Amino acid sequence: MSTEHNSYSKLIQALASILGLILLLVWMQGGFTTKTPPGTAQAADKGEPVRGPTAKVISKAIDDIMLWPGTVTARTVAQIAPKVPARILAINVNTGDAVKSDQIVARLDSAELQSRVNQTRSALAAAEAQAAKTGADLRRAQSLFDQEAATRQTLEAAQAAAQTSMAQVAEARAAIATAESTLSETVLRVPFDGTVLKRNQEPGDMAMPGIPVITVQSGQRMRVEAAIPESCARDIQLGEWLKARIAENEFSVKVEEITPAADPKTRTVLVKAGFDNPGAAKPGVFVWLEQNCGSRKVLSVPSSAVSRSGQLESVQLVLEGGGRLRHIRTGKIRDGWVEVLSGLKEGDVVLAGGGK
């Protein structure tokens, strides 16, 4: 009997301990206190009038500024290719190297073309020698004809020979100019200051006309290329100035090209806007392109009314008999006004200096 009584007492004690623990947890969670509705905390000085300037929450139309991701590209790109087929002997630059206008970037095998130049020079020497001989013959024939010691037929034959020789000299000189011009094509130069974008071929490869050996891009004039949804792209005009931003660097760009048709898969239009390189922009860099795509109505309060503590934002909501702390979410700030995403409604009155 005594054993059963002891077991019963221990069970009662255990239940009491569990009940006490539950009550303690409920108390710690605020179960025995009156809760304030979400988003509003009663001010400690409720009942006292709010002092200081106030402002109403208003609804106002604002420009809907959109940021589109884009890429910086070079406005001018040159594919440096030879005009004659020849084997590549040397390439003097690497990808990323800065180059100057008229700088030599590659050399091709010129042995065969140099031999052709030498042949044309030899042909010119022979033609000039023949022209000298026929010229002398013409002078002699003219002298004899004047002395009536030679016939007109002889004179005319000498004149024809001299003219033929002079034509051969002119032809030989033209052949030299052509051969030397072709020879110069074995030295590849860049047409402007810029940066080597790519080495398309390597020494030992066979260079062919129209196939680039080096690709160079200009660093003076750049472009921002961005794919913009067609609903917003229709508001963009050629020649319009837009804002672009790379990190903290903001600059203006001028719309130079708008793709006439939208991409059927993405429903976007490619927009290209040019700018003078500010120095920080390099081809391939990520950029934000800013565009005003219509307008929308938003709730706004003066930015001075908003207090911030970490990630929490709040205002002092003015009510009859006092004020309350109201937690809100905000958006963009424009001209001293901040967009209110939630927590307030139009017509609410807030303490204008709540953010100070």
Image (cartoon, rainbow, N blue to C red):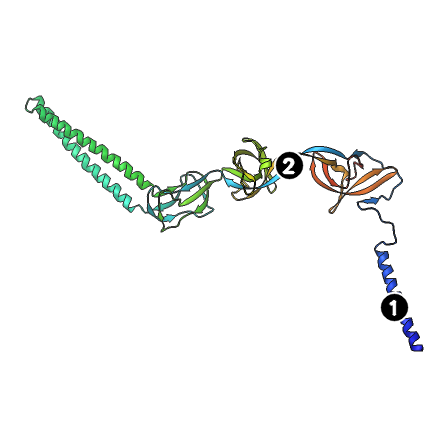
Taking the view exactly as shown, the residue that stands out farthest to the front is 264
What SS does tag 2 mark? Answer: strand
Taking the view exactly as shown, the residue that stands out farthest to the left is 149
Lateral position of residue 256 relative to residue 126, left or right: right
For label 1, the residue is 14
Residue at point 52%, 44% (across, down): 284
Relative image position of residue 261 (x, y in whole percent) = 52, 36
Relative image position of residue 195 (x, y in whole percent) = 46, 43
Q: Quadrant of residue 233?
A: top right
Residue at point 52%, 33% (across, down): 256
Q: Residues within 10 Å of mark 2 (few under 14, many from 20)?
A: some
Q: Residues within 10 Å of mark 1 (few under 14, many from 20)?
A: few
Q: Quadrant of the N terminus?
A: bottom right
The mark nearer the N terminus, 2 or 1, is: 1
Q: CA distance from mark 2 to mark 1?
A: 65 Å
What SS does tag 1 mark? Answer: helix
Q: Amino acid at mark 1?
A: Ala
Lateral position of residue 188 relative to residue 243, left or right: left
Residue at point 91%, 75% (across, down): 4
Camera-side residue of 65 and 54: 65
For label 2, the residue is 65
Establish if 206 lies above or below 161.
Answer: below
Q: Quadrant of residue 47?
A: top right
Q: Amino acid at mark 2?
A: Ile
Lateral position of residue 333 relative to residue 18, left or right: left
Residue at point 75%, 37% (across, down): 304
Relative image position of residue 216 (x, y in whole percent) = 44, 42
Relative image position of residue 139 (x, y in whole percent) = 13, 27
